[in-house]
Amino acid sequence: MAIGIKDKVAIIGMGCTRFGELWDKSSEDLIVEAYKEAAQDAGIEIKDIDAAWYASCFEEVNVGRGGIPLARALKLPNIPVTRVENFCTSGTEAIRGACYGVASGACDVALALGCEKLKDTGFGGLPDLGTGEESKFYYPNITAPGMFAQVANAYFAKYGLSREEGKKILARISLKSHQNGAMNPRAHLRRVPSLDAIINAPVIADPLGLFDCCGVSDGAAAAIVVRADMAKDFRPDPVYVKALQISLTPATGIGHQSWDGAHFESTRVPGVKAYEEAGIKNPREEINLMEVHDCFSISELVTYESLQISPMGKGGVDVENGFYDLDGKIPCQSDGGLKCFGHPIGASGIRMAYEIYKQLQGKAKPEERQLKSNPRLGLTHNHGGICGSLVCSVAIFGNES
Amino acid sequence: MEDYYFYDRVGRIKSFTSDRLAFSMDPPAMYGLIDFDEGGRLYLDITDCDLDSLKVGSPVKMSLRRRYTDKRRGTYAYFWKAVPILEKGE
């Protein structure tokens, strides 16, 4: 294996707007707000930035194509600005671009920023995202909840769970994220429904109900990356990048019977590579907190297992034992997750890194959200596309070099 | 390479859903991954059934159905859909 990114670069500043239905803010407003917080946090100015990577998934929705929206909003002075888009991993792709740029020596200070204005579509759910291979003439009209609903049904069947047993586990996952989101003033959804209300909510795509689905939001998030050896010139508590992995499947899952439909091979592979890159031997013991791609509750459950934190088929046991709760062994979605913090796609991977960064520094706000366990290593996970044909990112961050 | 036909082969439901968000002329849209007994897998619409009759592992047969209608231009598109094979008495 290649040497990898471990301890070559560090994050010295981050920003994240409130996520939600931000009718009174344009994408430019959100970009500026996320950038300002990050720049102030890092103690840098626009002239210090050598290059920028900009993530947005739906350029059609009031954000714009290419790197121009970012360059224009921030008045970046004739530097390289690259737009990245790779479904729901777009934000992590921007971090990856900035980190690789800095690690290569091509730039000293790089900006990664993601922004999305999804509420401007005027409808719920996401605009259509073609992946190329499916013809509308013969493929079912597959939606995102419909895709993950199938994973739920395949998972329930594989592990002998009734619909009621399965839905109860999923509801417990969403309840935990609502409890965390309610404590976070920047989260999109801040009410805590009862377990019964979650289980009995209207069905979107069977067996998934309304509360199994994440918020679709407006928002932006930003990170400033420098070489690791420069980091302490900016601040005493930088956060070091330990692993950055992106992986795409060859889509065999949707055309070949080798995929069981109940795990994410697309997550397992980059997870293994990320642990190796970061020097982690036993992720269940060494990872201290996680932000995983909980676009749907079943996605979070199956991700616990595919990341080898929970044993296969036993994720529900950990869920019911509170293993992933804010006061559990590995708090997951401590900021509310996609479920409640919200999911402006291009910003989401960076928003996850923001939460890990703040928790690793001991600076999560308000203070009652800060983990008392002195976390050292945090993991972020995104995936998108079609189940069986997903793009997935796994990143690991640490507060010690 | 020889042509290989799936239309008369039995498939089994690997995963399924009944989707109320997806556009459908006859909502909710039901679809899933179908595994053919002699190999092969395809995402297909599932029709002529209700949600309660769908189970992972239950058999389906192929049926050629209209999938797309454009009345203004008078064009129609057809494709195969999966129809559950019901036991007698169901």
Image: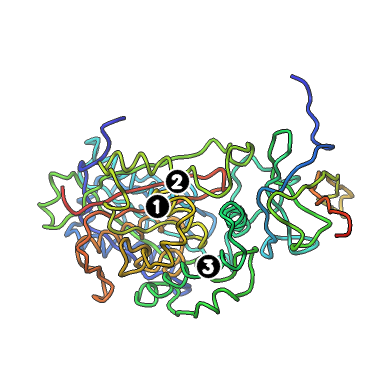
> Mark 1 packing: few (<14 Cα in 10 Å), some, or many (20+)?
many
Name the residue that disc number 1 marks.
A381
Disc 2 vs disc 1: which is toward the camera?
A: 2
Question: For residue A101, which quarter of the picture?
Answer: top left
Q: Are marks 2 and 3 in contact (CB under 8 Å)?
A: no
Residue type beneath disc 1? His
Residue at 81% across / 59% down in the picture? B49
Name the residue that disc number 3 marks.
A119
> Mark 3 packing: few (<14 Cα in 10 Å), some, or many (20+)?
many
User: Going from the N terminus, do you reach mark 2 or mark 1 first?
Assistant: 2
State the CA–CA distance, disc 2 to disc 1.
Answer: 8 Å
Q: Are marks 2 and 1 in contact (CB under 8 Å)?
A: yes
Disc 1 vs disc 3: which is toward the camera?
A: 1
Q: Is residue A229 above or below residue A326?
A: above
The mark tally for this picture is 3
Residue at 73% across / 47% down in the picture? B44
User: Going from the N terminus, do you reach mark 2 or mark 3 first?
Assistant: 3
* Chain for disc number 1: A
State the SS at label 3: helix
Residue at 71% across / 45% down in the picture? B34
User: Going from the N terminus, do you reach mark 1 or mark 3 first?
Assistant: 3
Residue A208 placement (x, y as % from top left):
60, 65
Tell which of A352 and A261 is nearer to you: A261
Residue type beneath disc 2? Thr
Residue A49 placement (x, y as % from top left):
24, 49
State the CA–CA distance, disc 2 to disc 3.
Answer: 29 Å
Name the residue that disc number 2 marks.
A267
Residue type beneath disc 3? Lys
* Chain for disc number 2: A
State the SS at label 2: helix
* Chain for disc number 3: A
